[in-house]
Image: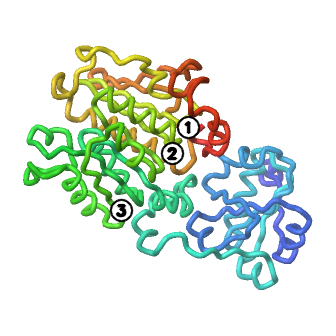
């Protein structure tokens, strides 16, 4: 019988002393521990690639399979397994550090033990998000520092606000001048029967503070108009549009372009919902999508046409998802894409929306376009 183990590639293991010399010689360091271990301290020049992600991500992290790699974990067991997995993919110059990080530090190896970005309570609360490679402590810190303004505390604003607050958005502003009505309760889940007649922003604040006391809720108990729109949106990072009329959407669009504020738009009608994201000068704006306002009879409000109770929940949650990507600078937003949901058929469709060079708001003749190139260059990757 053939000895199968004899054909397996040999895993090269090195001591801490040898590893220090390899690091000096230019070996790229791969840390295969978990995110929480990394946050407790790590080699500054290392790249975090948890063991469970090695097979899926190593080729994206290190495209050249001849690159000299120094792989380490806490003591050497996981790093040896990681090297074996790398070898199975064709990596020819990976070695495993067989030794502890305590010895690495004792022998003078570089080490970075950053101050915690989150308090112990925050680490416990957001522990499931911290495990996501695209978030971690740095990403969660971005969310905690983020400021999101919701235009409307109704059907779309309710689910968005609930999950934005639950996930740790630091400041949520609510713009609404309406009071809770019994007819709202079928879909506006921020509000309850005992708050009928209460201002919606106050009712929303009570619900959101009960869910996450750490989130700061700012009430703007007024209706968004051309006179107050710039003041309202100026201090926020992302705007969530939950309005139900074209006039307000056009006003918001133009102010957001002027102040370079991304807007996550949602709309609902009976069984149908739409979601897109407008990133100033990096994609189309609302006027590109709707150059002229349709007749009122073709775009009635929910109070006239009706709406399925669960529909704003679905659309509002997708809006919240866009907010996370914008604040974190990850993934692909819906900028330039209109996502349409048919609740009757349970089907998503998507159409491309192009930026109109002749658009009066964001086109070549726009009064805001002159400074747009510099602004667009500074946008996070997900906002492009």
Tell me how far mark 1 sits from mark 3, CA to CA.
Answer: 26 Å
Residue 138 falls left or right of residue 109: left
Tell me how far mark 2 sits from mark 3, CA to CA.
Answer: 19 Å
Tag 3's secondary structure? Answer: loop
User: What's the residue at 26%, 42% (across, down)?
Assistant: 223
Q: Which residue is mark 1?
A: 332
Would you call the spot at circle 3 few (<14 residues within 10 Å), some (14-19), or many (20 or more)? many
Q: Which residue is mark 3?
A: 215
Residue 131 at least partly seen: no
Q: Earlier in the sequence, mark 2 or mark 1?
A: 2
Q: Position of residue 161 (x, y in %)?
A: 32, 49
Residue 371 falls left or right of residue 99: left
Tell me how far mark 2 sits from mark 1, CA to CA.
Answer: 7 Å
Residue 41 falls left or right of residue 106: left
- Whether residues under marks 2 and 1 lie with C-beta atoms below 8 angstroms apart, the answer is yes
Q: Position of residue 234 (x, y in %)?
A: 45, 49
Farthest bottom residue in view: 106
User: What's the residue at 60%, 55% (across, down)?
Assistant: 52
Q: Earlier in the sequence, mark 2 or mark 3?
A: 3
State whether residue 213 is above or below residue 244. Answer: below
Q: Earlier in the sequence, mark 1 or mark 3?
A: 3
Q: Which residue is mark 2?
A: 325
Which quadrant would the C terminus be assigned to in this image? top right
Residue 17 at least partly seen: yes
Residue 172 falls left or right of residue 134: left
Q: Position of residue 251 (x, y in %)?
A: 38, 33
The image quadrant that residue 364 belongs to is top right
């Amino acid at each position: 019988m053939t000895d199968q183990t004899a054909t397996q590639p040999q895993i090269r293991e090195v001591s801490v002393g040898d590893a220090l010399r390899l690091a000096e010689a230019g070996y790229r360091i791969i840390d295969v521990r978990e995110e929480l271990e990394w946050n407790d301290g790590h080699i500054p020049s290392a790249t975090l690639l948890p063991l469970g992600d090695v097979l899926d991500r190593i080729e994206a992290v290190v495209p050249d399979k001849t690159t000299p790699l120094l792989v380490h974990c806490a003591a050497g067991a996981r790093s040896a397994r990681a090297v074996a997995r790398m070898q199975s993919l064709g990596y020819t110059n990976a070695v495993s550090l067989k030794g502890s990080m305590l010895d690495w530090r004792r022998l003078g190896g570089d080490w970075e033990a950053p101050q915690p970005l989150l308090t112990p309570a925050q680490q416990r609360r957001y522990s499931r998000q911290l495990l996501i490679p695209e978030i971690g402590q740095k990403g969660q810190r971005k969310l905690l520092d983020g400021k999101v303004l919701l235009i409307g505390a109704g059907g779309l604003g309710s689910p968005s606000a609930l999950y934005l607050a639950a996930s740790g958005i630091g400041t949520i502003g609510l713009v609404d001048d309406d009071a809770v009505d019994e007819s709202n309760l079928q879909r506006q889940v921020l509000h309850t029967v005992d708050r009928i007649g209460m201002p919606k922003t106050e009712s929303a604040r009570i619900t959101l503070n009960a869910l996450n006391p750490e989130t700061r809720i700012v009430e703007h108990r007024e209706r968004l108009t051309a006179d107050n729109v710039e003041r309202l949106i100026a201090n926020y990072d992302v705007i969530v549009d939950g309005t139900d009329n074209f006039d307000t959407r056009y006003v918001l669009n133009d102010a957001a372009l002027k102040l370079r504020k991304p807007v996550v738009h949602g709309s609902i009608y009976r069984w149908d919902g739409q979601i897109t994201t407008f990133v100033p000068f990096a994609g189309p704006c609302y006027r590109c999508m709707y150059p002229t306002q349709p007749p009122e009879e073709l775009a009635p409000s929910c109070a006239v046409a009706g709406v399925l109770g669960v529909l704003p929940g679905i659309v509002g949650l997708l809006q919240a998802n866009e907010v996370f990507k914008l604040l974190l600078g990850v993934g692909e937003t819906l900028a330039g894409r209109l996502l349409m949901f048919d609740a009757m058929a349970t089907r998503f469709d998507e159409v491309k929306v192009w930026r109109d060079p002749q658009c009066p708001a964001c086109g070549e003749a726009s009064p805001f376009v002159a400074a747009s190139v510099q602004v667009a260059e500074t946008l996070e990757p997900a906002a492009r």
